[in-house]
Image (cartoon, rainbow, N blue to C red):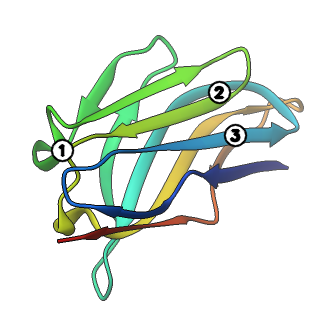
Amino acid sequence: QVQLVESGGGLVQAGGSLRLSCTASGSIFSIGAMAWYRQPPGKQRDLVATISGGGNAAYVDSVKGRFIISRDNAKNIVYLQMNNLEPEDTAVYYCNANGLGITGRPFQSWGQGTQVTVSS
């Protein structure tokens, strides 16, 4: 079983910054792609950014140039640095990871979510 725990959310004014962290733990053999999703109030959960095991990153257009996804493979952590935040970024942010467990079986896990609120 693989667990993901997010941290770093909070309340920030528009134009401010936050850094989210997500740590994976449990019966992990290897982790491939990791990602951040977000779910605004009353809306569906959407992809924000992804990063491959080799560090290749991709972003949804609305956050390009403002958000940076990175990872520490040695510690099984993925980060999301969020700069120049806008009220439209308000959402619950979830991390997601895909990989192989120690038994060789693939897994996909989600974190519990962390709230980010941006005030105008």
The image shows residue 79 at horizontal and vertical percentages of 50, 34
Instruction: Tell me the distance, in whole angstroms, between the alpha carbons under discs 3 and 2.
Output: 12 Å
Place residue 88 in its image quadrant: bottom left
Instruction: Tell me the distance, in whole angstroms, between the alpha carbons under discs 1 and 3.
Output: 22 Å
Residue shown at 59% from the left, 38% from the top: 98
Name the residue that disc number 3 marks.
23
Dot 3 or dot 2: first in sequence order is 3
Place residue 72 in its image quadrant: top right
Residue shown at 77% from the left, 37% from the top: 105
- Outermost residue, top side: 54
Q: Is residue 44 left or right of residue 112?
A: left
Q: Label 2 sits on what residue type?
A: Ile
Name the residue that disc number 2 marks.
31
Q: Label 3 sits on what residue type?
A: Thr
The quadrant the C terminus occupies is bottom left
Name the residue that disc number 1 marks.
63
Residue shown at 19% from the left, 45% from the top: 84
